[in-house]
């Protein structure tokens, strides 16, 4: 399995909507994910882009470290942790960037690092369609023709108590040298 997972390997969640022309050739990695292997990423991104789809790249490396003696099992567990992280973000792809074996005081460990990716139609990352609303109903279950933005409940970022506490600690006068507070008194 260590040969199957290496830097450059791309994993995609089964059931992910993909452009009609692009049928990934890969092996089953788990019951829910397919390994596309090590691909020419720039060519893959260009073909997805030419179809009007986007292959999003999320900044910030994610990584998992696993202790143990069986290299294949350590890599499998580390990748499973990364997949869990990607799924909690409601994304559908994972690109492995590093697989490193090492040891500390004679105890071997493996670190697998990668980046969360997402394939979807359009240019705007729409994670809101997969997130549940406050009632627990996924927004994807609602009609996509209606405006999803009108369904978002707007609440103030800070409550009145937080603003009052901030003002008691110096508030605008403390942070802006009194200019904002003085201007407010003049107006």
Image (cartoon, rainbow, N blue to C red):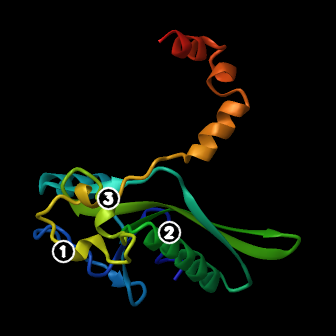
The Cα–Cα distance between marks 3 and 2, rounded to whole angstroms, is 41 Å
Across and down, in percent, residue 53 comes to: 18, 57
Q: Residue at x 62, y 69 (%)?
A: 64
Q: Nearer the viewer, residue 94 or 35?
A: 94
Q: Which residue is mark 2?
A: 6
Measured in 3D between alpha carbons, the distance from the residue under mark 3 to the one under mark 1, in whole angstroms, is: 36 Å
Is residue 131 rendered to the left or right of residue 151?
Answer: right
Q: Is residue 149 above or below residue 89?
A: above
On residue 23, the disc is 1
Q: SS of the residue at dot 2?
A: loop
- Look at the picture and state if 23 lies above or below 43: below
Q: Which residue is mark 3?
A: 152
Disc 1 or 2, which lies upstream in sequence? 2
Please name the residue shown 23% across and 77% down the image: 141
User: Which of the two marks, 3 or 1, is nearer to us in this view?
Assistant: 3
In the shown orientation, is residue 39 left or right of residue 123?
Answer: right
Residue 99 visible to the viewer: no
Question: Toward the viewer: 69 or 135?
Answer: 135
Q: Quadrant of residue 125?
A: bottom left
Q: Residues within 10 Å of mark 1 (few under 14, many from 20)?
A: few
Nearer to the camera, 174 or 147: 174
Q: Nearer the viewer, mark 1 or mark 2?
A: 1
Residue 184 as seen in the image, left or right of residue 174: left
Above/below status of 101 relative to 186: below
- Residue 59 visible here: yes
Q: Position of residue 56 (x, y in %)?
A: 33, 55
Residue under the point 62% across and 86% down: 73
């Amino acid at each position: 399995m260590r040969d199957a997972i290496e830097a450059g390997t791309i994993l995609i969640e089964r059931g992910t909507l993909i452009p009609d022309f692009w049928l990934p050739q890969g092996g089953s990695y788990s019951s829910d994910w397919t390994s596309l292997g090590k691909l020419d990423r720039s060519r893959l991104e260009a073909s997805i882009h030419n179809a009007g789809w986007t292959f999003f790249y999320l900044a910030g490396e994610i990584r998992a470290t696993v202790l143990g003696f069986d290299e294949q099992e350590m890599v499998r567990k580390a990748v499973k942790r990364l997949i869990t992280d990607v799924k909690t973000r409601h994304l559908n792809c994972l690109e492995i960037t590093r697989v490193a074996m090492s040891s500390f005081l004679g105890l071997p460990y493996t670190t697998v690092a990668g980046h969360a990716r997402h394939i979807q139609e359009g240019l705007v990352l729409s994670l809101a369609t997969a997130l549940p609303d406050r009632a627990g109903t996924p927004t994807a279950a609602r009609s996509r023709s209606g405006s999803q933005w009108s369904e978002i409940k707007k609440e103030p970022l800070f409550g009145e108590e937080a603003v009052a506490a901030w003002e008691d600690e110096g508030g605008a006068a403390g942070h802006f040298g009194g200019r904002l507070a003085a201007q407010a008194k003049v107006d």
